[in-house]
């Protein structure tokens, strides 16, 4: 029976169509809502089709790590709400959840998206600590990319609390780069971006590639037991570049709209 | 923000004109919104905005309970109340706290009387509450979200459950307290009811109240609960009022 | 655009008062003092003889004796199979109720039904305290070979069947696929091209979504004619 469904999927892929009507290289509808948690220093809810994640940021001050006395600290946490999928259990994230968090973390860190040197209040003694926590609210596939978009949108719209803003001499987190993860699944000989949960069951392998706005790649992660050819990997890298541009433009647009609405609010007060 | 909120005096909590910190009158509840069926993986769900509270409740089940936790004559209800690290003024540690355990129990016991557990022997029903943003009265807002999510999951129930916290500031009873009133006020009195049954299912009180104040608090709570209940019912009906005429043809 | 006025059925929530009179509390309701209240989020059906009842809008399948269900084998034991029937209660199919004559202890039951297989079965007993028992020892029951499984909300299956089977016989006649419909909401779509399968899924989703509107059969018929032409003539 699973075989019948797989054949049904493959027959559709042949005419560049998926069960939900998308083309193979098409993302589901993306919605980005910055500022949904005003008590956080930055936040964004992201809906990718029916997949929903929420990223929240708190910024505190504290001591730097001993080996990086002149750098601020970024901590990325991942929480899987137990109602987000029947397999999710209350408590700390499992292997899968930790994997998603790690890819977001590496994408930002390796991509040097945040200049950690700019977060030092007093060298070796006091730095700003950015706590980025991502909550998966509903898992309908590709939590990875939804999380990456939410993280970036939350960072772009985050504001330092007044005391830290004063100590650092700036209001908001400045980003040097804009990392975006694009996840590509492989079923048979077909590559499809943004796999849905239904498709995930049939994936041979999956590759998440985080790309910066200049095309450089800041993280790659293959999961599942299947194998990819060299040519497929290169096609994925190309596809990731193209798709990340689309997603990044959507984040930029949402952040810009949010900021101008906020400014308007302040001016009116 | 990481600065500790300054302690407010009773006079700051309530002006001579009877106006509260957020501009409300003493008997005025906060804006209350309910959205039903916002998740696809949960069997039932509801998002509640009560003041600045932003709370998402999801129900998983009923499903067959593990043998060791099965009751042969009824279902067992599990409730987990959990706050996200970014939901509070000061970042909350992700570790599960004693407060969360206590509140989980209070919420479970507020909901249990409303569920017809004997209809579902040997099963388990899980209610998961995630606090995305906390204001005062999170347990009441959680009850309000959870009871709608249970109905949305198709669980047999005697009634919905609706809750509100009454407080006392400047020796005056006020309804639906926010976090400033919760932290600086003279009493916090959360009450949950089954509105059609007139029965109270959650009752806790911190602070000092006279016998007369307790009586008046319950009356005030009842009035607010009735209006919150209407919002819960409308949200459920709006979601599932069958699609009216389609435009085809 | 035609102006069509749809009659909409009455939606109630748990605890809502349905009747003050001596009306009988039917399924989905309970009596408290002298009044009848709903126990579910559901739609109300009032009947002079049978009293008032509420059909749940949501929720899992509650097994009923004699129901035809579509189940998915999730475990193979020494003498029985455990079957997911979209219910809080997992079904149990004893090897005797599969008509297996040989000693099941010495024979691997996987030879008959393996994990992941879909079966068409009938509920033979259920009392909530013991698991629902299934049988496949009747004509038309047993392993379902091939097809695309989908799942709809169980309380909406009656609309897929229709009054006296009116909807299902129309679907059988006009769709290019064949449907195996379980009362538990699991449906297997067999045959047809991938396009036919996609169209069938969209029709089933529409019936599920608009289950509680009037005139649904006519609207579905229009869609079928639009797609495949009028086959009545």
Image (cartoon, rainbow, N blue to C red):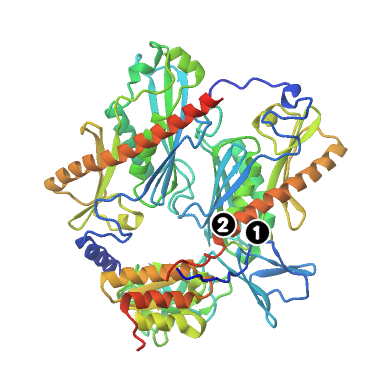
Name which of mark 2 and mark 1 comes first in the sequence.
Answer: 1
Relative horizontal placement of residue C98, taking residue B15 as reference (left or right):
left
Q: Nearer the viewer, residue A133 or A160?
A: A160
Dot label at residue B115: 1
Q: Chain of mark 1?
A: B
Name the secondary structure under disc 1. Answer: loop
Left or right of A146? Residue A217 is left
At 35% from the left and 41% from the top, the residue drawn is: A100
Under circle 2, the secondary element is: strand
Q: CA distance from mark 2 to mark 1?
A: 10 Å
> Are the residues at dot 2 and dot 1 in contact (C-beta closer than 8 Å)?
yes
Q: Tell me the residue that label 2 is attached to.
A: B125
Q: Compared to C1, does A173 lie above or below? A: above
Is B145 placed above or below B1 here? Answer: below
- Where B51 sits versus B108, above or below? above
Residue C95 placement (x, y as % from top left): 41, 79
Task: Left or right? Give the position of A140 relative to B128.
Answer: left
**Within-10-Å neighbours for mark 2: few <14, some 14–19, many 20+:** many
Q: Which chain is disc 2 placed on?
A: B
Residue C35, image x and y in percent? 76, 68
Task: Give the left or right position of residue B1, taking residue C171 as reference.
Answer: right
């Amino acid at each position: 029976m699973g075989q019948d469904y797989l054949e049904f999927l493959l027959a559709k892929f042949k005419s560049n169509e998926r069960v939900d009507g998308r083309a193979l290289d098409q993302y589901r509808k993306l919605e980005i809502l910055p500022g949904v948690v005003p008590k956080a220093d930055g936040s964004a809810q992201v809906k990718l089709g029916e997949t929903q994640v929420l990223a929240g940021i708190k910024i505190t001050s504290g001591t730097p790590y001993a080996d990086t006395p002149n750098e601020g600290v970024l901590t990325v946490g991942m929480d899987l709400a137990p109602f987000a999928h029947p397999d999710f259990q209350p408590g700390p994230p499992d292997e899968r959840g930790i994997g998603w968090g790690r890819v977001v973390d590496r994408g930002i860190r390796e991509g040097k998206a945040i200049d950690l040197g700019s977060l030092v209040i007093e060298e070796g003694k006091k730095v700003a600590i950015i706590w980025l926590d991502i909550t998966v609210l509903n898992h309908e596939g590709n939590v990875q990319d939804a999380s990456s978009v939410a993280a970036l949108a939350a960072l772009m719209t985050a504001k330092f609390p007044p005391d830290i803003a004063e100590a650092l001499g700036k209001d908001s987190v400045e980003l040097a780069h804009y990392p975006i993860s694009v996840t590509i699944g492989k079923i048979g000989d077909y590559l499809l971006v943004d796999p849905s949960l239904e498709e995930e069951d049939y994936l041979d392998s999956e590759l998440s590639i985080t790309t910066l706005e200049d095309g450089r790649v800041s993280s790659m992660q293959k999961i599942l037991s299947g194998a990819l050819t060299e040519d497929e990997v290169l096609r994925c890298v190309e596809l990731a570049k193209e798709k990340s541009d689309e997603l990044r433009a959507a984040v930029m647009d949402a952040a810009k709209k949010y900021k101008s609405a906020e400014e308007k609010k302040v001016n009116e007060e | 923000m990481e600065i500790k909120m300054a302690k407010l005096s009773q006079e700051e909590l309530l002006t001579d004109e009877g106006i509260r910190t957020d501009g409300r009158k003493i008997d005025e509840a906060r804006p209350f919104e309910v959205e039903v069926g916002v998740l696809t993986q949960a069997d039932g769900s509801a998002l509640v905005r009560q003041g600045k509270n932003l709370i998402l409740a999801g129900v998983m089940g009923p499903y067959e309970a593990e043998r060791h936790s099965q009751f042969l004559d009824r279902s067992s209800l599990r409730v987990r109340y959990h706050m996200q690290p970014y939901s509070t003024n000061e970042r909350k540690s992700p570790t599960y706290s004693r407060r969360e355990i206590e509140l989980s129990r209070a919420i479970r016991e507020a909901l249990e009387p409303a569920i017809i557990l004997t209809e579902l022997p040997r099963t388990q029903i899980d209610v998961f509450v995630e606090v995305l943003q906390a204001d005062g009265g999170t347990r009441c807002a959680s009850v309000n979200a959870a009871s709608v999510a249970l109905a949305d999951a198709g669980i047999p129930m005697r009634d919905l459950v609706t809750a509100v916290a009454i407080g006392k500031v400047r020796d005056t009873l006020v309804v639906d307290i926010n976090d400033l009133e919760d932290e600086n006020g003279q009493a916090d009195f959360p009450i949950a009811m089954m509105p059609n049954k007139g029965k109270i299912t959650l009752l806790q009180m911190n602070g000092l109240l006279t016998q007369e104040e307790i009586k008046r608090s319950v009356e005030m709570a009842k009035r607010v609960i009735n209006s919150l209940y209407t919002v819960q019912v409308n949200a459920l009906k709006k979601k599932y009022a069958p699609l009216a005429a389609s435009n085809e043809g | 655009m035609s102006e069509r006025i749809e009659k909409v059925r009455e939606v109630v929530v748990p605890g809502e008062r349905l009747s003050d009179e001596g009306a009988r509390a039917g399924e989905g309701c309970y009596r408290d003092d002298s009044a009848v209240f709903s126990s579910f989020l559901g739609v109300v059906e009032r009947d002079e003889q049978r009293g008032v009842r509420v059909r749940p809008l949501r929720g899992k399948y509650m097994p009923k004796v004699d129901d035809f269900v579509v189940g998915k084998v999730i475990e193979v034991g020494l003498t029985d199979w455990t079957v997911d029937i979209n219910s809080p209660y997992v079904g149990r199919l004893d090897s005797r109720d599969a008509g297996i004559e040989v000693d099941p202890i010495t024979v691997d039951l996987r030879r008959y039904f393996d994990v992941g297989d879909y079966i068409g079965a009938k509920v033979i007993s259920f009392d909530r305290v013991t698991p629902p028992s299934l049988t496949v020892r009747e004509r038309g029951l047993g392993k379902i070979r091939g097809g695309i499984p989908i799942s709809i909300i169980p309380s909406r299956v009656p609309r897929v069947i229709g009054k006296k089977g009116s909807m299902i016989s129309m679907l059988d006649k006009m769709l290019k696929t064949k449907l195996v419909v379980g009362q538990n909401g699991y449906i297997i779509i067999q045959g047809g091209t991938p396009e036919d399968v996609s169209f069938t899924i969209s029709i089933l989703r529409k019936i599920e979504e608009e289950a509680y509107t009037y005139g649904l059969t006519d609207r579905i018929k229009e869609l079928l004619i639009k797609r495949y032409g009028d086959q009545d003539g």
